[in-house]
Image (spheres, helix red, strand yellow):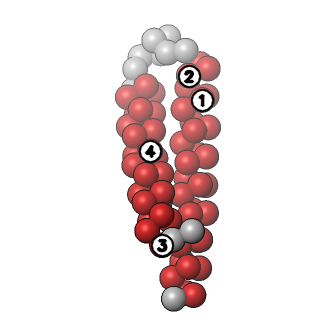
Amino acid sequence: MTKYFVAEVGSSVGHLNDLLNVMCELQFGLAQGETDPRVESLLWIARDLSNGINDKIEEGYAKLEAQS
C-alpha cells in the first residue's frame, strides 16, 4: 500500500463523512412525522461508522509516515 493510496482513501472517507453529516442535518431538520425512523437509524449508524473508518485510516497513514 502506498502513501498516495492511503491519502486518497482518507480523503474519500472524509468526504463521505461530510456528505452523511449534511444528510443527517437535512433529514433530522424535518418536522416530526415526515421521516421514516429506519432511515434516521441508518443515517446515524453510517455516520458513526464512517468516523471510525476515518480514524483508522488516519492512524495507518501516520504509521506509514513514521516509517519514511
Q: Residues within 10 Å of mark 4 (few under 14, many from 20)?
A: some
Q: Do the CB atoms of the residues marked 4 and 1 lie less than 8 Å apart?
A: no
Between the residue at mark 2 and the residue at mark 1, the CA separation in whole angstroms equals 5 Å
Q: CA distance from mark 4 to mark 1?
A: 14 Å
User: Gap in Å between the C-alphas at discs 3 and 2?
Assistant: 36 Å
Q: Quadrant of the N terminus?
A: bottom right
Amino acid residing under circle 1 = Leu
Using the rendered view, name the quadrant where residue 25 is placed. Answer: top left
Q: Residue at x 43, y 60 (%)?
A: 8
Mark number, residue 42: 1
Q: SS at mark 1?
A: helix
Image vertical order of residue 32 relative to residue 60, above or below: above
Is 9 situated left or right of 59 in this image?
A: left
Q: Position of residue 11 (x, y in %)?
A: 41, 57
From the image, tell me which residue sits under label 2. Answer: 39
Q: Earlier in the sequence, mark 1 or mark 3?
A: 3
Q: Are marks 2 and 1 in contact (CB under 8 Å)?
A: yes
Choose the circle earlier in sequence order: 3 or 2. 3
Inter-mark Cα distance, 1 to 3:
32 Å
- Residue 6 vs residue 62, the one in the foreground: 6
- Rendered location of residue 34, percent (x, y): 45, 12
Return the residue found at the far top. 33
As drawn, which residue projects farthest toward the front? 1
| CB under 8 Å between discs 3 and 2 | no
Q: How many marks?
A: 4
Q: Which mark is residue 16?
A: 4
Marked residue nearer the N-terminal end (4 or 2): 4
Left or right placement of residue 30 versus residue 51 in this view: left
Mark 4 or mark 3, which has the lower sequence index?
3
The amino acid type found where label 4 is placed reads Leu
Q: Residues within 10 Å of mark 3 (few under 14, many from 20)?
A: few
